[in-house]
Image (spheres, rainbow, N blue to C red):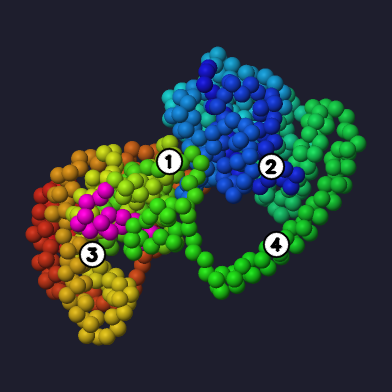
Amino acid sequence: MNNTSILIVNGGKDPEEGKWLTLYLEKLYKFTDPTKFNLIVWNNNVVDENITFLKSRYSFDLLEPIPNDKMFHPHAVPLQRLFNYATIKYKSEAIILMDSDAFPVKTGWFEELTEAVKSGKYVLAGIWRDELKGAIQPYIHPSCMCFSTQFARNNNLILDFYGINTETKKHDTLSYFTEKAIELNGKLYKLNRSNKNNFHRLMGGIYGDYVYHHGAGSRDDISFWDEIPNPQKRRINRAINTNASKLLFQNFESYINWLKGDDVSNDLYSIITLDQQKSEIETKKNKSINLIRRIKSAAARTTDKQKDNPQKSDTDFFNNMQGMPTENDFTKLRKPAGCEYSLPDIVGLGVPKAGTSLWFDNLLSHPHIVPHRFYDQNRETSKELHFFTHLGHHPINEGQKEIYKKCFLKQDGVLCAEFSTIYFSNLMSLNNLLNTVKKETIFVLILRNPIDRYISHINHVMSNRAKGLGLNDKDRLDRFYKYSVIPESIYYSLYSNSLEYLLSRVDKNKIYIDTYENFRTDPEKSYRDFIDFIGVRQYYIGKYHLDIDYKKPKNVQNYIIEKPTSEERVIIAENFRSDVSRLKSILPDLKLDSWDF
């Protein structure tokens, strides 16, 4: 089996004595021929400058999180991103997954695992995790797991899926790979725990005499499947973890040899004894209490400073309503390693006041769909770049196209998206957009009963823009309402002309159309229909999967205007009756049963 990639996710808490990734790389390159693999590292610790030094010293590809990316799990989702990268860039035929706290301790480990899979005799090879078999079925653990890409693809296996937990069946990271192998009657090549001495039944293990796995190395809150979690047990686990980490970084050779069966040396004895562990527990407990007090005190001081000197977030310095981003704006944004600029894969076109903020928020719950770079989930309108709105009737130039492209970042297997609600009704903006994006781009249109949309639009403008314009005088506010707001509200509720233009420029199979009413009635179906439409993977809902609150409030505003009576709705409907009739003829399959026309 040629072209093997080793994938590792680095992140979490490092020991006081050193850094997991540093130790991992040192041991990997000591006990492995670097010409036999591609190493690809995902680094969640983006503020750790040590990664720059490590990359200059060792040979590996580096990927980092995209800002505002709502990954539902910081380990599983990056593993899938790394798999995409390895199979696309390197055409990798074999994959080895490792943790930053799991590394070889003996030459030959790589050949042992890859040959087992290459021979076709084994489906999976790696660390056999059976220490917790009283609570979870034993499985090949991703701290060191080797498999062929063909096995994953042929069985539709992904690395950011955990399996569904039930009362009788539990799943850990990628344990369902083992389940699939057993289901197919495939053989497992197991590196069994080979310790002669044990610091802990799971933490600090050597497997097959080849690979050390620290276990929970980067976690603070440590509990195991077969334990009833309680504060005292967690403190004991943390103390054991801390001591084992200290041994690794300060007495590596002595510690590893002791695990393999050597007598304990003098420099290890005081750390290994139970009395010392108990002392460590109490010391750590007291340190933790003091640390929490200091953190709370510092947080209070920071809050006070922010009140005096409010700081803008990375996404606040660009106001999408005031202008287009400039080259200077991008100098203030960090470009993560492994990301490329990209024109968007998904663009929402409209319409305003049709639930698009919640729709877009739900969309971003998918682990491989990311927003534009200026998105801020705490700001309702930040989904809208309004890039093409600022061009007016001027055609877009090549420089502006490059700026628009820099508004998006992506990695292999990731889709990037924006949703600017007024592009649909503004044919000048729509034309410039269509002249910029790639031919594969998917366009989204969410329509709403034009009467309800009209009323909501009036309320929105009078609640927001009117105040921003300082129209406090009753007469001026009244003129603004009659001569600006009402015509605008009617205009954005007319759909057929823009739709006909869009269909004349874009293949219908690249346009997804839904209604606000359908979306609100069955939001989960609406979400899944779109995921199917764009051809990306569906994910289960629940723990370690998509956590979408379809009913959560989003962009909710109180009505400051009176809602129309039944008689008034009939009068309003006359503005839209012929347009709705034309819309139905253009889209005969679109469900508009709830629209009162």
Which residue is drawn at the image coordinates 21% and 55% (left, top)?
A: 394
Where does label 2 land, which residue? 19
Tell me if 209 is positioned left or right of 335 in this view. right
What's the residue at 29%, 51% (across, down)? 348
Q: Secondary structure at mark 1?
A: strand
* Label 3 sits on residue: 453
Residue corresponding to mark 1: 340
Looking at the picture, tell me which residue is in the foreground, 596 or 146. Answer: 146
Which-is-in-front pick, marks 2 and 1? Answer: 1
| 390 sits to left or right of 580 | right
**Mark with earlier residue (2, 3):** 2
**Where is residue 412 shown, x and y percent of the image?**
43, 36
Q: Residue under circle 4?
A: 292
- 479 to 349, vertically: above or below: below
Looking at the image, do the residues carrying marks 2 and 1 touch, with CB atoms under 8 Å apart? no
Q: Amino acid at mark 1?
A: Glu
Of the two numbered discs 1 and 3 in the rendering, the one whose residue sits closer to the viewer: 1
Q: Position of residue 549 (x, y in %)?
A: 42, 56
Q: Residue 303, located in which quarter of the rendered image?
A: bottom right
- Is there CB contact under 8 Å for labels 2 and 4? no
**Gap between marks 2 and 3 measured at Cα:** 55 Å
Q: Residue at x 38, y 62 (%)?
A: 319
SS at mark 3 in the image: helix
